Amino acid sequence: METTHTSLLKDKFLELYQKEQEAIRGQATPLVNRIRRNALARFRENGFPTTRQEHWRFTDLSPLLNTEFAFDFSNQSRNIDVDKIFTCDVYDLDTFSITLLNGWFVYKHAPLTRLADGTIIGSLAKAMEIYPAIVDQYIGKAAKTDQYEMAALNTAFLQDGLFIYVPDGVEVEKPVQLINIVNADHPVFLQPRHLVIAGKGAKLTLVHCDHSLTHNISFTNTVMELFAEQDAVVDHYKIQNKGRNSALVTNNFFHQKRNSRLSSNIITLNGGFTKNIMDVSISQPDCVSEHYGLYLVDSNQHVDNLVNIDHMAAQSRSDQLYKGILDDEATAVFSGKVLVRRHAQQTQAFQNNKNILLTDDAKANTQPHLEIYADDVKCSHGATVGQLDPEAMFYLRSRGLCERTARQMMMIAFANEVVQKISIEALQKRIQNMVEKRLKGELSICDQCVLHCNSKEPTTFNIDLSKL
Amino acid sequence: MSDKNDHILEEVSNAEYKYGFYTDIEMDQAPPGLTEDTIRFISAKKNEPDFMLAFRLKAFRHWKTLKEPDWAHVEYPPINYQDLIYYSAPRKRPKYDSLDEVDPELLETFEKLGIPLDEQKMLAGVAVDAVMDSVSVGSTFKKTLAEHGVIFCSFSEALQKYPDLIKKYMGSVVPYTDNFFAALNSAVFSDGSFAYIPKGVRCPLELSTYFRINAANTGQFERTLIVAEEGSYVSYMEGCTAPIRDENQLHAAIVEIIAHKDAEVKYATVQNWWPGDKEGKGGVYNFVTKRGICKGENAKISWTQVETGSAITWKYPSLILQGDNSVGEFYSVAVTNNKQQADTGTKMIHLGKNTRSTIISKGISGGQSNNSYRGLVKTSRKAENARNFSQCDSLLLGDQCGAHTFPYIDVGNRSSIVEHEATTSKISEDQLFYCLQRGIDMEGAIGLIVNGYAKDVLSKLPMEFAVEAQKLLSISLEGSVG
Amino acid sequence: MLQIKNLTVSIHGKPIIKGLNLEVKEGEVHAIMGPNGSGKSTLASVIAGREVFDVDQGEISYMGKNIFDMPAETRAREGLFLGFQYPVEIPGVSIANFMRTAINEKRKYLGLDPMTGAEFLRLMEEKKKMVEIHSKLTNRSVNEGFSGGEKKKNEIFQMAMLEPRLAILDETDSGLDIDALKVVANGVNKLRKKDNATIVITHYQRLLDYIVPDFVHVLLDGRIIKSGNKELAMELEEKGYDWIKKETANDAV
């Protein structure tokens, strides 16, 4: 059953598509536009997901959709000095940094850069113009628009986002850092689209930071398609630190080929409403797929992580570890699914979700599911919801620690299991620091934000775009 | 596995379903189909009080608004509910004072089933209420039970003799609105068992019921209601068999258990309904709603089930832990072989403070079967210090079967601790070789290892059931390793 | 009793045993020694009937019958016992139940009636005493949570229960402290009879101080390169396997 506002917004999208078709299509390739039309048909059929659907049972989009969003489909990709609106304060983190502002690629030098080793990094919109063959070879191949309504919506309206192509055998030395900034003085609905391709034996580290520089309502619905070709190694980090009024749905589709290694790490520190979908297809043997998550939520924040791993081929290993600490009236959902198909023998799959509830008003729902059709497998899963171990608490207190310190120490230790999976040292330190501050109550969303509106010094809200 | 072993397995797996025989007793049947008239027919046949007919009709009207659930991990062709016969009773409906008066053919049937109606079993101390195609035909030990004030009789008899108790408790744990099959059962149920244990009484016997589906195309819709008053204790056993038939038989039962303050109820099932043949033809559709409520403080209910039969099992014996400090347990072994499909598990709903629940589930799948555990553990905001531990393991015996685990955990307060663990594995070649080297053949080795695997659950069964269950496990797995 | 002629065994195409000859007669104790990877455990597994290995060539006859005609369980029922180097855990299956099943399967094979519960318990008590194991051990699940020593004692207990004609003890001494070693060796010695035979596979000479062999064979790279009496074991302990490698190399020249 669709609520009034979801069906209103659905109609609005369908109408916008008709009206703005030309702007939406832009310079997209014919193939992309064909995919777009199919996705629109899916969206027309299925609409927005509702709580009657298995994967959305505890995550209700409908109140969020009850907003008068403003839409602008004109190309807003342009040259600005991004340093002025945002600086990343991860010290010692030397990255190839790129920025999306309200879903559009903004750049200091060029919209698309081709490095000496052949790596292409930049705007997807631009890539569709300059490298249509590469884009067409991959785009839409991983995103399951039949299965995921929000991915269908994104695909129907895809315009710009991040594009990375790492040729066969190339190791990208510096991590690529994507900074996704939302800044608008009216409620916006954004749908960035990312396409990442790591060729055979390629190596790539991607750091993806979601920030909002506004207190206005925003809804971001992203799709990332990531392809790891044979022997490729990809590490993907997501740091989500968004305002209370922001809603974020990320649809991540990973496709792994023979002997590729993929790791993802999602750290959700803040965000009014967050839903992360990780859908992994292991289509060839001998892959490793590791997925870690940490969510620290309070007030009435809601975070929902869905991890679907499809073992289609033999001798691969997948590992999921998601941990969360929930304070106040926060709610968290974890749905993990491992599917081991008949021919995926010698699969090893592990799945674990652990939650700590700090109050009686917080709620955790966890569903770690296994669906197994091959017999020679090692699969296990576990889930716990509980509190800090009272024995350990007592032990610390008997050594003279006050309850507050003991509690913090325990929480930090709990979170560290995930943080330690981050292999970029500078990033790990920085996140560890943020997590610690967050758990000590010292970090609010504003710490990260250049607006510093919580500080005593007066700040203005509309410093950025007009002044650039 | 070598060809040689395949051969041995094949030979053994051709063993016939032991309980597949058909009893030719004149039946008194309702015409096929389901209308309000069918329901009036059933109710009139059974001479029921008015409230019962009203309940049935309400349930039927509600059922008509429902859709058959499709979320379970099972597949089957659509059931035409208008083709089924909703009432079938042995025509000679006698009142038995002694076993001599019972139709000898019926007794022979029970003999073959090994139903403990005979002298030996009496000595063993078992009271039996046998239900054959829905109508209870004989009860023993009523006297001993009556001395303790325990009521154990057919549901129909209870409706005549204790309408107030039925009225008070029937539908209080599983309302007719609960689900599709519960609504259907509430509308058309034909008979079942009723047990009532008065305050402070420790039931001196293990209560035991056998269900058996006999006639073709009959749905078996029995209903069991167990009420344990304050401080009482009862252990209840239910066994099921059905003869071999090509067509599928539907079984949609309801079991309700109410445990008051300090009461304890143990409910054990060994289910070996006809699972269909190796090609998946025939077999029972077992769509059952079982639920208990720990109403008072310190109440305890445990479900123990050994599921080896049925073509399709859809069954989640659940518990509502309402009383503070109440305890719920679920122990399950589910074996699927050939083309069987099982989607089974439990729900533990923690409402009271300091409530505790334990779930141990062992799924074993062989052949081309699918075996799913589906379970919900929920703690409400008020269920302070609720505890749950779940262990759900799956064992795969071959590469054509599936083993699935679908836990749902919803925690609504900070002092609850809910833990779920699960593993999926196969019997290791090393274990098999170790047994072979000691002179035990392949079938024996698998039986031994599987029984060991399921031991945590089997040990919860009453002694006499446990032996039967162990045999059943081995029989059910014949030919399971491909 | 056991005759092995020109045995060649490989796994996944990789040769492990390369033309091995051995004869064991009733009443004899043979020790097979050799460094890691020389093929000792493979030999034991092949005799016992493990199917992961490919027998490429050669024959093994046991009690006058071709051993390859019999599946593993038949060999066991014919009195062949393998004491495993790494006994596997079988959760939930008690040792008592396991042994009773094994004994009755063997009796069935020999056309005897199954043993009654009382008979079995008596036998078990007797054998437990004989091999000096705790009475509680048999109530536990097979090898589950056992220490290394307990596992090996359990193997010897099972050997006592099954009364084999030919027992092959695969590295039964590994990981044992001196007390456990004595218990194991005592058990083996008590079970020695005129009409049965034992093959002791070991890495070290230490065990042979307690179980005195009639013959010692040195297995190297899939072949028996030297046979002798118990002095050979002493010499080997003293001079190491390198000595024998050189020695045989010289012989070849």
Image (cartoon, helix red, strand yellow):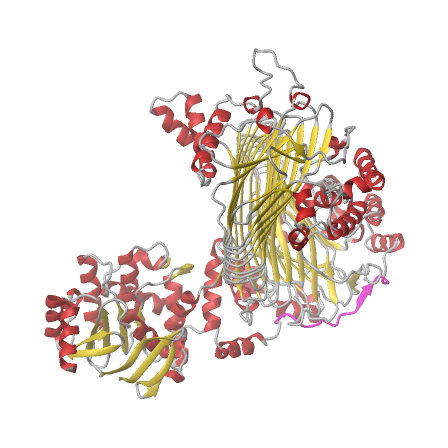
- Tell which residue pokes out farthest to the bottom in this image: C64
Is residue C104 left or right of C23 when viewed as pictured?
Answer: right
Return the x and y of residue C147 as percentages of the image width and height: 30, 55
Which quarter shows the N terminus of chain C?
A: bottom left
Q: In which quarter of the image is residue A269?
A: top right
Residue A158 painted magenta = no
- Tell which residue pokes out farthest to the right in this image: B37
Q: In this view, does B256 lie above or below C74?
A: above
Q: In this view, does A70 lie above or below B452?
A: above
Q: Which of A114/B297 is in front? A: A114
Return the x and y of residue B323 as percentages of the image width and height: 60, 34
Residue B19 painted magenta = yes
Q: Which of B205/A429 is in front? A: A429
Q: In this view, does B118 lie above or below C24?
A: above
Which quarter shows the C terminus of chain C?
A: bottom left
Our reading of the magenta stretch's main secondary structure is loop
Return the x and y of residue C25 as percentages of the image width and height: 22, 83
Instruction: Examine the rendering and report whether any part of residue C134 can be seen.
Output: no
| Magenta span | B18-32
